[in-house]
Image (cartoon, rainbow, N blue to C red):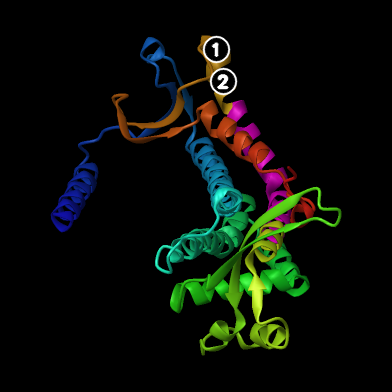
Amino acid sequence: MQLAATACALLREIAYVAASLDGVRSSPMAYVLGSLIIAHSDAVVSVTVDEYLALRKAVDGLLHRIDAEEKFDAVVENYKELEEFILNQALQAVFSHGGHDHVSAQAPRSTTARKVLNFLSSARLYCSTIETHAAAITGEKSSAASVKAAMGREFDTSMSYRIMDALRNYAQHSALPVHGYTVASGWNSDRTIMDHEFDPQIRVSDLADDSNFKKETLAQIKNGPPTLKLKPLAREYLESLSNIHNDFRGATNKSVEALSQKVVDAKKRLTDNDEIPDIGIALFEVDEEGYKIGEPTNLSRSLTDYLLYLERKNRQLVNFSKRRIAY
Protein backbone atom coordinates (compact mmCIF):
# COMPACT_ATOMS: atom_id res chain seq x y z
CA MET A 1 0.00 0.00 0.00
CA GLN A 2 2.78 2.43 0.94
CA LEU A 3 4.81 1.48 -2.14
CA ALA A 4 1.82 2.10 -4.39
CA ALA A 5 1.20 5.49 -2.80
CA THR A 6 4.85 6.44 -3.28
CA ALA A 7 4.73 5.38 -6.91
CA CYS A 8 1.61 7.46 -7.51
CA ALA A 9 3.23 10.49 -5.92
CA LEU A 10 6.28 10.03 -8.13
CA LEU A 11 4.13 9.77 -11.24
CA ARG A 12 2.30 12.95 -10.30
CA GLU A 13 5.64 14.74 -9.83
CA ILE A 14 6.84 13.52 -13.24
CA ALA A 15 3.60 14.70 -14.85
CA TYR A 16 3.96 18.08 -13.12
CA VAL A 17 7.50 18.54 -14.43
CA ALA A 18 6.53 17.41 -17.91
CA ALA A 19 3.62 19.84 -18.01
CA SER A 20 5.91 22.67 -16.94
CA LEU A 21 8.44 21.82 -19.64
CA ASP A 22 5.66 21.72 -22.25
CA GLY A 23 4.70 25.28 -21.38
CA VAL A 24 1.32 24.36 -19.89
CA ARG A 25 2.12 26.55 -16.92
CA SER A 26 2.45 29.96 -18.53
CA SER A 27 3.60 31.90 -15.46
CA PRO A 28 6.01 31.11 -12.60
CA MET A 29 4.98 30.05 -9.11
CA ALA A 30 4.52 32.84 -6.54
CA TYR A 31 4.76 33.08 -2.75
CA VAL A 32 2.38 34.88 -0.40
CA LEU A 33 1.60 35.53 3.24
CA GLY A 34 -2.02 34.88 3.99
CA SER A 35 -4.57 34.13 6.69
CA LEU A 36 -6.04 30.71 7.44
CA ILE A 37 -9.12 32.39 8.91
CA ILE A 38 -12.09 32.28 6.54
CA ALA A 39 -13.13 35.86 7.28
CA HIS A 40 -9.71 37.09 6.10
CA SER A 41 -8.97 34.49 3.44
CA ASP A 42 -8.61 37.16 0.73
CA ALA A 43 -5.90 39.05 2.63
CA VAL A 44 -2.54 38.22 1.11
CA VAL A 45 0.84 39.87 0.71
CA SER A 46 3.34 38.78 -1.91
CA VAL A 47 6.86 37.78 -0.88
CA THR A 48 9.92 37.13 -3.01
CA VAL A 49 11.45 33.70 -3.35
CA ASP A 50 14.37 34.84 -1.18
CA GLU A 51 11.99 36.06 1.53
CA TYR A 52 10.04 32.82 1.27
CA LEU A 53 13.15 30.70 1.72
CA ALA A 54 14.40 32.89 4.59
CA LEU A 55 11.08 32.55 6.42
CA ARG A 56 11.00 28.82 5.87
CA LYS A 57 14.50 28.64 7.32
CA ALA A 58 13.45 30.77 10.31
CA VAL A 59 10.48 28.51 11.05
CA ASP A 60 12.68 25.44 10.68
CA GLY A 61 15.12 26.87 13.23
CA LEU A 62 12.33 27.61 15.70
CA LEU A 63 10.96 24.10 15.26
CA HIS A 64 14.40 22.70 16.05
CA ARG A 65 14.42 24.72 19.29
CA ILE A 66 10.92 23.48 20.14
CA ASP A 67 11.99 19.92 19.40
CA ALA A 68 14.93 20.23 21.78
CA GLU A 69 12.75 21.80 24.48
CA GLU A 70 10.18 19.01 24.14
CA LYS A 71 12.87 16.36 24.50
CA PHE A 72 14.22 18.00 27.64
CA ASP A 73 10.66 18.28 28.94
CA ALA A 74 10.27 14.52 28.39
CA VAL A 75 13.42 13.96 30.47
CA VAL A 76 12.06 16.09 33.32
CA GLU A 77 8.58 14.56 33.24
CA ASN A 78 9.92 11.00 33.19
CA TYR A 79 12.11 11.85 36.17
CA LYS A 80 9.09 13.31 38.00
CA GLU A 81 7.14 10.10 37.42
CA LEU A 82 10.06 8.10 38.82
CA GLU A 83 10.35 10.21 41.96
CA GLU A 84 6.57 10.33 42.44
CA PHE A 85 6.50 6.53 42.46
CA ILE A 86 9.37 6.36 44.95
CA LEU A 87 7.64 8.88 47.23
CA ASN A 88 4.37 6.98 46.93
CA GLN A 89 6.06 3.76 47.98
CA ALA A 90 7.47 5.55 51.04
CA LEU A 91 3.98 6.77 51.85
CA GLN A 92 2.61 3.25 51.52
CA ALA A 93 5.24 2.15 54.03
CA VAL A 94 3.75 4.55 56.59
CA PHE A 95 0.56 2.47 56.54
CA SER A 96 1.96 -0.96 55.75
CA HIS A 97 3.07 -3.43 58.41
CA GLY A 98 4.44 -6.07 56.07
CA GLY A 99 2.48 -9.08 54.93
CA HIS A 100 3.54 -8.99 51.27
CA ASP A 101 4.38 -12.37 49.80
CA HIS A 102 7.66 -12.88 47.95
CA VAL A 103 5.93 -12.63 44.56
CA SER A 104 3.98 -9.39 45.03
CA ALA A 105 7.04 -7.85 46.66
CA GLN A 106 8.69 -7.82 43.22
CA ALA A 107 6.19 -5.30 41.83
CA PRO A 108 7.77 -2.15 43.37
CA ARG A 109 11.19 -3.16 42.00
CA SER A 110 9.96 -3.89 38.46
CA THR A 111 7.81 -0.75 38.35
CA THR A 112 10.73 1.39 39.54
CA ALA A 113 12.93 -0.23 36.89
CA ARG A 114 10.40 0.55 34.16
CA LYS A 115 10.26 4.21 35.20
CA VAL A 116 14.06 4.42 35.36
CA LEU A 117 14.18 2.92 31.87
CA ASN A 118 11.79 5.62 30.59
CA PHE A 119 13.91 8.31 32.20
CA LEU A 120 17.17 6.96 30.78
CA SER A 121 15.70 6.44 27.30
CA SER A 122 14.45 10.02 27.11
CA ALA A 123 17.84 11.24 28.35
CA ARG A 124 19.54 9.23 25.62
CA LEU A 125 17.28 10.72 22.94
CA TYR A 126 18.05 14.20 24.26
CA CYS A 127 21.82 13.72 24.40
CA SER A 128 21.95 12.05 20.97
CA THR A 129 20.24 14.92 19.16
CA ILE A 130 20.93 18.13 21.06
CA GLU A 131 24.11 18.93 19.10
CA THR A 132 22.22 18.57 15.81
CA HIS A 133 19.50 20.92 17.04
CA ALA A 134 22.05 23.52 18.12
CA ALA A 135 23.79 23.54 14.72
CA ALA A 136 20.47 23.66 12.85
CA ILE A 137 19.26 26.67 14.87
CA THR A 138 22.39 28.79 14.51
CA GLY A 139 23.75 27.44 11.25
CA GLU A 140 27.16 27.16 12.91
CA LYS A 141 29.11 24.06 13.90
CA SER A 142 30.56 25.97 16.85
CA SER A 143 27.16 25.79 18.59
CA ALA A 144 27.19 22.01 18.40
CA ALA A 145 30.77 22.02 19.66
CA SER A 146 29.73 24.18 22.62
CA VAL A 147 26.99 21.72 23.59
CA LYS A 148 29.34 18.77 23.12
CA ALA A 149 31.83 20.46 25.45
CA ALA A 150 29.07 20.89 28.07
CA MET A 151 28.27 17.18 27.92
CA GLY A 152 31.96 16.36 28.24
CA ARG A 153 32.25 18.65 31.26
CA GLU A 154 29.36 16.94 33.06
CA PHE A 155 30.71 13.49 32.20
CA ASP A 156 34.16 14.36 33.54
CA THR A 157 33.03 16.06 36.75
CA SER A 158 30.05 13.95 37.83
CA MET A 159 30.37 10.31 38.88
CA SER A 160 26.57 10.06 38.88
CA TYR A 161 26.48 11.20 35.24
CA ARG A 162 29.01 8.51 34.28
CA ILE A 163 27.16 5.79 36.17
CA MET A 164 23.73 6.70 34.78
CA ASP A 165 25.15 7.01 31.28
CA ALA A 166 26.59 3.49 31.54
CA LEU A 167 23.40 2.25 33.21
CA ARG A 168 21.38 3.45 30.23
CA ASN A 169 23.43 1.23 27.92
CA TYR A 170 23.10 -1.64 30.43
CA ALA A 171 19.32 -1.19 30.57
CA GLN A 172 19.02 -1.09 26.80
CA HIS A 173 21.18 -4.11 26.04
CA SER A 174 21.37 -6.29 29.13
CA ALA A 175 18.83 -6.07 31.98
CA LEU A 176 16.42 -3.87 33.88
CA PRO A 177 18.32 -1.17 35.81
CA VAL A 178 16.97 -1.80 39.34
CA HIS A 179 18.03 -4.96 41.20
CA GLY A 180 16.37 -4.52 44.56
CA TYR A 181 15.04 -2.13 47.16
CA THR A 182 14.72 -1.63 50.88
CA VAL A 183 11.81 -0.25 52.87
CA ALA A 184 13.00 1.24 56.13
CA SER A 185 11.69 3.27 59.03
CA GLY A 186 13.39 4.80 62.02
CA TRP A 187 13.17 7.45 64.71
CA ASN A 188 15.18 10.65 64.55
CA SER A 189 17.75 11.38 67.27
CA ASP A 190 15.26 12.74 69.84
CA ARG A 191 12.54 10.24 68.88
CA THR A 192 10.02 12.90 67.87
CA ILE A 193 9.67 11.85 64.23
CA MET A 194 9.70 8.47 62.56
CA ASP A 195 10.93 8.64 58.95
CA HIS A 196 9.92 6.12 56.27
CA GLU A 197 11.91 5.45 53.14
CA PHE A 198 11.68 3.43 49.93
CA ASP A 199 15.20 3.00 48.59
CA PRO A 200 15.71 1.40 45.12
CA GLN A 201 19.19 -0.04 44.64
CA ILE A 202 21.60 -1.25 41.97
CA ARG A 203 23.96 -4.15 42.67
CA VAL A 204 27.50 -3.53 41.47
CA SER A 205 28.04 -7.27 41.06
CA ASP A 206 25.18 -7.42 38.53
CA LEU A 207 26.75 -4.60 36.55
CA ALA A 208 30.11 -6.39 36.66
CA ASP A 209 28.50 -9.53 35.21
CA ASP A 210 27.68 -7.59 32.06
CA SER A 211 30.75 -7.76 29.81
CA ASN A 212 29.56 -4.69 27.92
CA PHE A 213 29.27 -2.43 30.96
CA LYS A 214 31.72 0.45 30.59
CA LYS A 215 35.00 -0.76 32.03
CA GLU A 216 36.28 2.64 33.17
CA THR A 217 33.08 3.37 35.11
CA LEU A 218 32.96 -0.12 36.61
CA ALA A 219 36.54 0.25 37.86
CA GLN A 220 35.55 3.46 39.67
CA ILE A 221 32.67 1.84 41.58
CA LYS A 222 33.95 -1.71 42.07
CA ASN A 223 35.84 -0.99 45.29
CA GLY A 224 32.99 0.99 46.81
CA PRO A 225 29.72 -0.14 48.40
CA PRO A 226 28.23 -3.36 46.96
CA THR A 227 24.98 -1.54 46.17
CA LEU A 228 24.35 1.91 44.71
CA LYS A 229 21.43 4.05 45.86
CA LEU A 230 19.37 5.07 42.83
CA LYS A 231 17.80 8.26 44.17
CA PRO A 232 20.93 10.43 44.50
CA LEU A 233 22.30 9.09 41.21
CA ALA A 234 19.14 10.02 39.33
CA ARG A 235 18.88 13.46 40.92
CA GLU A 236 22.48 14.37 40.20
CA TYR A 237 22.14 13.07 36.63
CA LEU A 238 19.08 15.25 36.02
CA GLU A 239 20.94 18.27 37.42
CA SER A 240 23.78 17.59 34.95
CA LEU A 241 21.33 17.32 32.05
CA SER A 242 19.79 20.62 33.13
CA ASN A 243 23.26 22.21 33.11
CA ILE A 244 23.78 20.95 29.56
CA HIS A 245 20.41 22.31 28.48
CA ASN A 246 21.23 25.67 30.00
CA ASP A 247 24.40 25.76 27.87
CA PHE A 248 22.35 24.74 24.82
CA ARG A 249 20.00 27.66 25.41
CA GLY A 250 22.92 30.01 25.86
CA ALA A 251 24.42 28.86 22.56
CA THR A 252 21.17 29.30 20.61
CA ASN A 253 19.25 32.14 22.30
CA LYS A 254 20.51 34.95 20.07
CA SER A 255 19.69 32.99 16.94
CA VAL A 256 16.23 32.11 18.26
CA GLU A 257 15.54 35.78 19.01
CA ALA A 258 16.62 36.77 15.48
CA LEU A 259 14.53 34.00 13.88
CA SER A 260 11.49 34.97 15.95
CA GLN A 261 11.89 38.63 14.98
CA LYS A 262 12.11 37.67 11.30
CA VAL A 263 8.73 35.94 11.57
CA VAL A 264 7.21 38.87 13.51
CA ASP A 265 8.43 41.40 10.96
CA ALA A 266 7.05 39.38 8.06
CA LYS A 267 3.63 39.08 9.67
CA LYS A 268 3.47 42.81 10.31
CA ARG A 269 3.36 43.36 6.56
CA LEU A 270 0.05 41.55 6.54
CA THR A 271 -1.49 42.58 9.84
CA ASP A 272 -0.56 46.28 9.49
CA ASN A 273 -1.94 46.53 5.96
CA ASP A 274 -5.13 44.58 6.40
CA GLU A 275 -5.81 44.90 10.12
CA ILE A 276 -6.34 41.19 10.58
CA PRO A 277 -5.45 39.44 13.86
CA ASP A 278 -1.99 38.00 14.39
CA ILE A 279 -3.28 34.43 14.41
CA GLY A 280 -3.67 31.81 11.74
CA ILE A 281 -1.10 33.42 9.43
CA ALA A 282 0.84 31.15 7.10
CA LEU A 283 3.25 31.19 4.20
CA PHE A 284 1.92 29.70 0.96
CA GLU A 285 3.14 28.60 -2.41
CA VAL A 286 0.62 29.50 -5.12
CA ASP A 287 0.32 28.73 -8.81
CA GLU A 288 -0.02 31.32 -11.58
CA GLU A 289 -3.79 31.50 -11.01
CA GLY A 290 -3.37 32.24 -7.30
CA TYR A 291 -4.40 28.81 -6.03
CA LYS A 292 -2.54 27.39 -3.04
CA ILE A 293 -0.34 24.39 -3.76
CA GLY A 294 1.59 22.26 -1.30
CA GLU A 295 1.44 22.58 2.46
CA PRO A 296 1.42 26.01 4.14
CA THR A 297 4.21 27.03 6.54
CA ASN A 298 2.53 28.05 9.78
CA LEU A 299 3.62 31.43 11.19
CA SER A 300 1.05 31.42 13.97
CA ARG A 301 1.78 32.85 17.41
CA SER A 302 1.38 29.32 18.76
CA LEU A 303 4.88 28.65 17.43
CA THR A 304 6.60 31.21 19.68
CA ASP A 305 4.05 31.01 22.51
CA TYR A 306 4.59 27.26 22.88
CA LEU A 307 8.36 27.73 22.85
CA LEU A 308 8.12 30.36 25.60
CA TYR A 309 5.88 28.04 27.63
CA LEU A 310 8.44 25.21 27.49
CA GLU A 311 11.31 27.53 28.40
CA ARG A 312 9.47 28.89 31.44
CA LYS A 313 8.25 25.45 32.49
CA ASN A 314 11.73 23.98 32.69
CA ARG A 315 14.13 26.44 34.30
CA GLN A 316 17.68 25.42 35.10
CA LEU A 317 17.68 23.05 38.09
CA VAL A 318 20.37 24.72 40.18
CA ASN A 319 21.42 22.62 43.22
CA PHE A 320 18.68 20.15 42.34
CA SER A 321 20.55 17.20 43.87
CA LYS A 322 20.51 19.00 47.23
CA ARG A 323 16.76 19.65 47.29
CA ARG A 324 14.50 17.62 49.53
CA ILE A 325 10.77 17.37 50.12
CA ALA A 326 10.04 18.08 53.78
CA TYR A 327 6.95 17.02 55.73
Instruction: Note whether residue 22 is visible.
Output: yes
Q: Position of residue 189 (x, y in %)?
A: 85, 57
When asked about the image quadrant of residue 142, the answer is: bottom right
Q: Which of 305 and 201 is in front in this view?
A: 201
Q: Position of residue 108 (x, y in %)?
A: 49, 60
Q: Does the magenta stretch include residue 250?
A: yes
Q: Nearer the viewer, residue 109 or 304?
A: 109
Q: In this view, does 184 lie above or below 81?
A: below
Q: Position of residue 150 (x, y in %)?
A: 73, 64
Residue 222 left/right relative to 81: right
Q: How crowded is mark 1: few (under 14 residues within 10 Å), some or many (20 or more)?
A: few
Q: Disc 2 designates what residue?
A: 269
Q: How crowded is mark 2: few (under 14 residues within 10 Å), some or many (20 or more)?
A: some
Q: In this view, does 298 lie above or below 14?
A: above
| Residue interval drawn in magenta | 240-265
Point out the image quarter for the N terminus: bottom left
Q: Do the residues labelled 1 and 2 touch (CB within 8 Å)?
A: yes
Residue 232 left/right relative to 23: right
Instruction: Note whether residue 287 is visible.
Output: no
Q: In this view, does 3 lie above or below 227?
A: above
Q: Disc 1 designates what residue?
A: 273
Q: Where is residue 186 in the image (x, y as percent from the top left)?
A: 72, 59
Point out the image quarter for the C terminus: top right
Residue 99 left/right relative to 42: right
Spatial separation of the CA atoms under disc 1 and disc 2: 6 Å
Amino acid identity at mark 2: Arg
Instruction: Return the mark for residue 23.
Output: none
Q: Which residue does the image show at 65% across and 74% down from the upper left?
A: 228
